[in-house]
Image: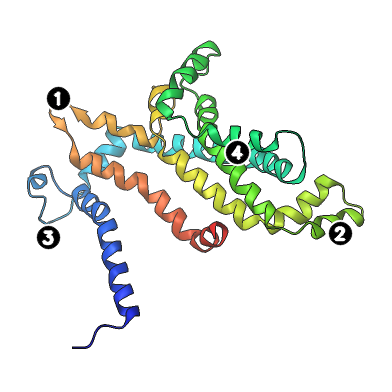
Amino acid sequence: MKKAPPRIREHALLALACLFSAFPIVFMLLTSFKTRAMLYEPARVLFEPTFDNYRAAIVQYGLHKFVVDSLIVSVANVAVCLVLGTVAAYALHKFTFRRKELVVFTILSSRIFPSIALVIPFYIIGIAFQLLDTYTILVLAFMVFNLPFVVIMMRSYFAAIGPEFEEAAMLDGCSRVGALLRVVLPQVKTGIFATGTMCFLAAWNEFTYALFLSASNVNMISTAVVFFKTERGILWGEVSALGVVAILPVIVLCFATQKFLVKGMS
C-alpha cells in the first residue's frame, strides 16, 4: 500500500489543525443564531436561524457603544505607542550610551508583571487625577504592554537596515530627523504596520485593565460579557452574539492586512 505524498499529508494535518482551531468559533456562531430553547440541543446544526440574540445584545445592552469605545481606545493607544516606541527604538538602535542594554532590559521587564498586579496603581492614579472611567486612563494603561512591544520590535527592524542609506541621505543635506522620516521609516513600513496590528489586537482583547478602570462612561467590548450573567443564569445566546461581534473586526483586519502582517513579522 502506497503512502500518501508528503505534501498531501502536510495539507491534511494543516486542515485538521484549522478545523480544530476554528471549531469554538463555528460553535459560537451557530449558538448566536439559536433560540433559547435550542440552546439545550448543542449538537443540532440544522435549524431556523434567528437574530433575536443580536437584537437584544445591540438594542437592549447597547453593544454598539462598546464597539465604538473599543475602537477609540485601541486606535489611540496604537497611535501613541507607535510614535513614542518608534522614536525610542531608533534612539536605542542608533546611539551608544552607558548601560544601554540595562535600559532595554528595563523596558522589556515591564511586560513581566501580570496586569492584575498593576491595575491597583493605575486605579489609584485614576482617582488622584480624576481620570478613572475615561479614554485617557485606558490608553495610558494599555501602554504598559504595548509600548515595550513596539520598542523591541522596531529596534529589530531598524537593525536590519544598512547604515549606508541614512548616511547617504545626511550627505545630501538631510538632518537626522529628515533621514529618519524620508529614508529609514519607508524601509520599515511593513514592520510598523505589523507591529501596529499586533498592538491593536492586544488592546482590543485586553480585559483586566478595561474591567477595573472603566465603569459606565467608557466600556470595552471585552468587558461586555459580565452584563449577560443574570439571576436566570448566563444568557448564552447573547454572549455568543457578543463574541461574534467582538471577533468580527479582528477577522476583517487580519484578512485585509494578511500580506503586510506576514511580511512584516517575518
Residue 227 shows in the view? yes
Marks 4 and 3 sit apart, C-alpha to C-alpha, by: 46 Å
Identify the residue at image location x=69%, y=52%. 158
Identify the residue at image location x=42%, y=50%. 250
Marks 2 and 1 sit apart, C-alpha to C-alpha, by: 69 Å
- Report the amino acid beneath label 4: Cys
Label 1 belongs to which residue? 231
Disc 1 crowd, CA 10 A, few/some/many (<14, 14-19, 20+): few
169, above or below 145, in the image: below
- Report the amino acid beneath label 2: Ala
Q: What kind of element bears circle 4?
A: helix
Kindly identify which numbered label has been placed on residue 168.
2
20 relative position to 44: left or right: right
- Report the amino acid beneath label 3: Leu
Q: What kind of element bears circle 1?
A: loop
Kindly identify which numbered label has been placed on residue 81.
4
91 relative position to 222: left or right: right
Marks 3 and 2 sit apart, C-alpha to C-alpha, by: 66 Å
Camera-near label (4 vs 2) is 2
Residue at far top of view: 128
- Report the amino acid beneath label 1: Glu
Label 3 belongs to which residue? 46
Could you tell me how many numbered marks the image carries?
4
Name the spot of residue 218 as percent of width and height, x first: 44, 27
Name the spot of residue 9 as percent of width and height, x first: 29, 76
Mark found first going from the N terminus, 4 or 3 = 3
Q: What kind of element bears circle 3?
A: loop
Mark found first going from the N terminus, 4 or 2 = 4
Marks 1 and 3 sit apart, C-alpha to C-alpha, by: 30 Å
